[in-house]
Image (tube, grey):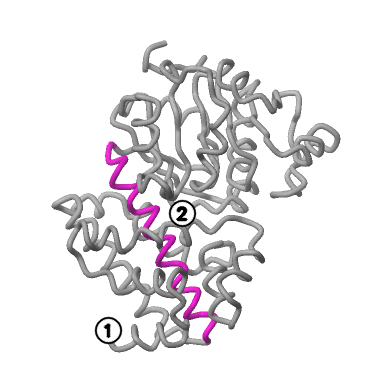
Amino acid sequence: MGYCLNKESRCAVIGHGSMATAIMKVLTTNETSVEWYIRNPEVMESLRTESRNCRYLADVEFDMSRIHLSDDLNEVVRNADILFLITPANYLKCYLSDLEASLKDKFIISAIKGIVPDEKLLVTNYLKQKYELCDEQLAFMSGPTHAEEVSHDRLTHLTLSCSNLDNAEAVGEKIRTKYLKLSFSQEMTYLEYISVLKNIYAVVVGMAIGLGYGDNFLAVLVANCAEEMRHVLDVTFSSSKVVDKIPSSFMGDLLVSCYSIHGRNRRLGVLIGRGNSVKSSLNEMTMVAEGYFASAMMPFMAESQRVQLPIAETAYQVLHQGLPVRKAMKNLEDLLA
């Protein structure tokens, strides 16, 4: 196969959360057979007996004749050519800890909008280093894509980025539907940075919502989040002009994360803004808020890139240093233009 994908390339999903479930639904619309690696026994049993994921998007029913379930990661990897990696970034190492099958001839799509915590690396960079993969074997899936809407055929725009656009477009044929529109880019690392940063800003916006700030202030806050994110990209990549070519993956992803009731990072911020401790808020979450883990990287990013990130650093101060959320937001008020 090399790194040239085609219609016969077989797909697998690794992960059983909401987005993994939504992408599996899309794949089974187009593919006659898809591998699905499930680590959770409860989810495995519910899929076998009820054709549903009992923990995530439980109202979505699958045609199980198109799915091969397995709790054996190596079996799933060996049986597939294309791997959709859809797990929380902080659990990625755990998910792959039993992997013995080679990834040398596999194509991997990451839908993980986070940083591998111990490594301080974007997910695709971690995969390249850990498994000695090349850029042409990796793609990143981004854009404003809440799983709840994808799974219910609500119109969604996705961007698939890969250094090899032919491979990105081949993957696109696997997931393109009437409701899932696709665009393609070669700016994989750029888009991955955006997806990490927008989660951090969504937490801060959620804090403001929880504290009772109104729409006027929220509009100013989100506008400043967009400007700060563009500044980070400009410093990191020497130019942020590519942002203008990918409005859905830049501004669209930021807006949906900040404003949608489905946004898990926004929800984390709302809980904290309403007076819950960081620990209790995390415990109340049924899904992982990637912004919590990504925010721990802010001091490292600010120092290494020599940039001022007052909004992103607000998330770090509240989530990891114990700064009271009301005081943190007060500090931000005078900084926003």
Measured as percent of width and height from the top left, residue 3 is found at 37, 17
In the visual, does 43 lie left or right of 142?
right
Q: Is residue 316 above or below residue 300?
A: below
Residue at 55 percent of width and 71 percent of height: 278
Residue furthest to the left? 238
Q: Is residue 50 above or below residue 207?
A: above
Q: Based on the displayed image, in which of its 4 quarters is residue 131 positioned?
A: top left
Q: Which residue is mark 1?
A: 335
Measured as percent of width and height from the top left, residue 204 is found at 44, 73
**Secondary structure category for the residue under label 1:** loop
Q: Is residue 214 magenta?
A: no
Name the amino acid, label 1: Leu
Q: In this rendered view, identify the residue nearer to me: 125 or 224.
A: 125
Residues at marks 1 and 2, CA–CA distance in whole angstroms: 28 Å
Marks 1 and 2 close (CB-CB < 8 Å) = no
Residue at 34 percent of width and 56 percent of height: 250
Residue at 51 percent of width and 38 percent of height: 93
Measured as percent of width and height from the top left, residue 186 is found at 28, 36
Residue furthest to the right? 49
Q: Main secondary structure of the magenta part?
A: helix
Name the amino acid, label 2: Pro
Q: Is residue 133 above or below residue 144?
A: above
Q: In this rendered view, identify the residue nearer to me: 165 or 134.
A: 134
Q: Is residue 261 above or below residue 161?
A: below
**What residue range appears in magenta?**
186-211
Residue at 18 percent of width and 53 percent of height: 241
Disc number lying in front (1 or 2): 1
Where's the N terminus, which quadrant? Answer: top left
Residues packed near mark 2 inside 10 Å, few (<14), some (14 to 19) or many (20 plus): many
Where's the C terminus, which quadrant? Answer: bottom left
Q: Which residue is mark 2?
A: 144
**Tally of numbered discs:** 2
